[in-house]
Image (tube, grey):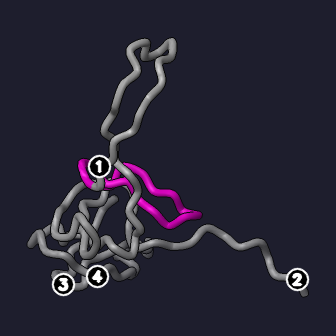
Amino acid sequence: MKKKASKQPKLHVRSGFTVKVISGDEKGKTGKILSIDLQKRRAIVEGLNMVTKHVKPTASSPQGGIEKKEAPIHVSNLMVLDPKTGEPTRIGRRRDENGKLVRYSKKSGEVING
């Protein structure tokens, strides 16, 4: 029997989560996740891992010049912040009273929305 095509990977982070960088040049800094690339397992975090990009003049930006923008960070270098204490925590999954699967903080037991 043939295997099904690989489905999207489950990650411990989602867009909108507040995370802390645990390794790399931006270690110790926190920010909000703007977007995630599931295939490359990388996330763009607001205000972190800034790079300069040279932009050619176009119709939309006739001046061109040098822009600063966020570069992706691998998700293994990110840890979700606990909504109650604000400290980094691991994520668990459990069923709530309605039978729906929810993510929760392993430190405080608080449900994480996102």
The residue carrying mark 3 is: 107
> Is 69 in front, or is 39?
69
Which mark is first along the chain, 3 or 1?
Answer: 1
What is the quadrant of the N terminus in the image?
bottom right
The residue carrying mark 1 is: 50
The residue carrying mark 2 is: 2
> Contact (CB < 8 A) between labels 4 and 2?
no
Q: Give the range drawn in magenta.
A: 33-48
Which mark is first along the chain, 2 or 4?
Answer: 2
For badge 3, the amino acid type reads Lys
Instruction: Name the front one of labels 3 and 4.
Output: 4
Q: Callout 1 environment at 10 Å: few (<14), some (14 to 19), or many (20+)?
A: some
Drawn side of residue 97 relative to residue 110, left or right? right
Residue 28 x, y percent position in the rendering = 16, 69
Which secondary structure lies at badge 4?
A: loop
For badge 4, the amino acid type reads Arg
Residue 107 x, y percent position in the rendering = 18, 84
Q: Marks 4 and 2, how far apart in space?
A: 35 Å
The residue located at (47%, 18%) in the rendering is 57
The residue carrying mark 4 is: 90
Q: Callout 2 environment at 10 Å: few (<14), some (14 to 19), or many (20+)?
A: few
Q: Marks 2 and 1, how far apart in space?
A: 44 Å
For badge 1, the amino acid type reads Met
> Contact (CB < 8 A) between labels 3 and 4?
yes
For badge 2, the amino acid type reads Lys
Which secondary structure lies at badge 2?
A: loop
Residue 56 x, y percent position in the rendering = 48, 24
